[in-house]
Amino acid sequence: MTEQEKRLAIHGGEKSVPSLGSSRPKVGVEEIMELLDLWPIGPERKRRIGDILAEEEADTLRPMAGPHLFRYYGPTESKVQQAEQAFAEAMGAQYVLGVNSCTSALIAALVACGVGPGDEVIVPGYTFFASASAAVVAKAIPVIAEVDESLTLDPDDLERKITKHTKAVIPVHMRGTGCDMDRVMAVAQKHGLRVIEDVAQACGASFQGKRLGTFGDCGCFSLDFYKIITSGEGGFITTDDERLYVRAQSYHDTAACWRPDRYARERMPGELFCGENYRMSELQGAVALAQVRRLDERLDRMRANQRRMLSGIERIAGLSFRKLPDPEGDAAVCVGLFCPDVETTKRVIPALQAEGIVAGGIYDATVRDWHIYTNWEHILERKTPTEEGCPYTCPYYKGDLPEYAADMCPRTLDLLSRSVHVAVSSDYTPEVCDRIAEGINKVMRVYLR
């Protein structure tokens, strides 16, 4: 061995870099203080919190160790994983995957279920645009179906819209109310369709004692700020099928393959493929975990308030109520009413709002409502990001393209044009609920004479 070789550290020589020195955490006290700005904490209290954190750093004689905000590789159990486990227990699902939005959940679920070029996916005409958009992103053709008096997918029209190219259906549990899942599942099983439930607006609701999102192949949930529980942004996928879970995992994480042995060869056909990045962060996971723990308590209060409001509303001639396929399982985010005609509805909504009631319909929106298919010009006009026009021009699609038109779902438009939605909050007191019911009676007595 030469003298130069002996000097190498690998042979016992002195290290060139004996220490890299200390380093500050990537995320520390400054980030905590910025997060505090999201709450209405007064400057004095915020200063005191900052002092406590500074004392903590001083006691350890080093910068406070920061959190590991990426769900993988962390030194402690992931908050996203804890949230998934808590949600799985709450929903009664075998597998749960945290993602960054319900839109991502829908796309990943469709891909996991094998939906792609040449396929059709049936969606209701009353849902957030993302339900239909997800089908297009998955390279399938969306087919728009009617809703019934529950304002959810009409099982009869679902069956009418099925063709030999139909691969899946997305029943959407709108405004807290579940679809008639007995009938939807019967139609799907009869025709061999995949079922991807969109539970964005009905988290925790149930049908016949079974949680929504656990009937079909996959359930997709939203944790957007305006949903029943929230992590600001985020979502969950539920499934009882390990293969679908693994495929959704792959798609949600650029095919990083989070399997029992992520570096192993493919265990089953269709397990490995390229994907997107839909991961949920640890910040979202931590908030989601706390929110999941409070879900049932919040639902109990909302249901109690909805029942109280419904019991106080008079049965006035001309006024009808939204059909609830399972009243006990409803998420109770609103009380749905129908006026007898459009003109009455247009007069009732501002009158209710003037009474201090949070009420709305399709006539009081200041912007186009993306929940109504007539505003989905992206679909109706088959708009695509490139001139090739995929998936509408896909050679794998052998069917007749749907004839999209603003009047293609007349029953849906009639029901929505006469509907009035009265918001229900878990924070309403019994007195507030009674006053809302009386305010509804006061207005309806005038306009439904």
Image: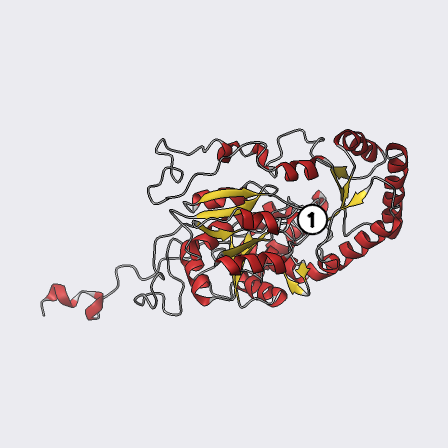
Q: Is residue 103 left or right of residue 372?
A: left
Front in this rendered view, residue 379 or 290: 379
Q: Residue 90 falls in which quadrant of the image?
A: bottom right
Q: Position of residue 112 (x, y in %)?
A: 43, 57
Front in this rendered view, residue 206 or 263: 206
Q: Position of residue 310 (x, y in %)?
A: 83, 50
Colour scheme: secondary structure
Say whether residue 344 is visible: yes
Position of residue 150 relative to residue 75, above or below, is above
State which quarter of the image contains the N terminus: bottom left
Q: Residue tagged by mark 1?
A: 150
Say whether residue 58 is visible: no
Front in this rendered view, residue 164 or 92: 164
Which amino acid type is shown beneath numbered disc 1? Ser
Q: Is residue 191 left or right of residue 215?
A: left
Q: Residue at x 69, y 39 (%)?
A: 415
Position of residue 77 relative to residue 110, above or below, is below
State the residue lying farthest toward the front.
160
Q: Position of residue 278 (x, y in %)?
A: 46, 51
Q: Residue at x 72, y 44 (%)?
A: 42
State the residue lying farthest toward the left.
2
State the SS at label 1.
loop
Q: Position of residue 387 (x, y in %)?
A: 36, 31
Q: Residue at x 34, y 68 (%)?
A: 267
Number of labels in the image equals: 1
Neighbours of disc 1 within 10 Å: few (<14), some (14-19), many (20+): many
Front in this rendered view, residue 355 or 61: 355
State which quarter of the image contains the C terminus: top right
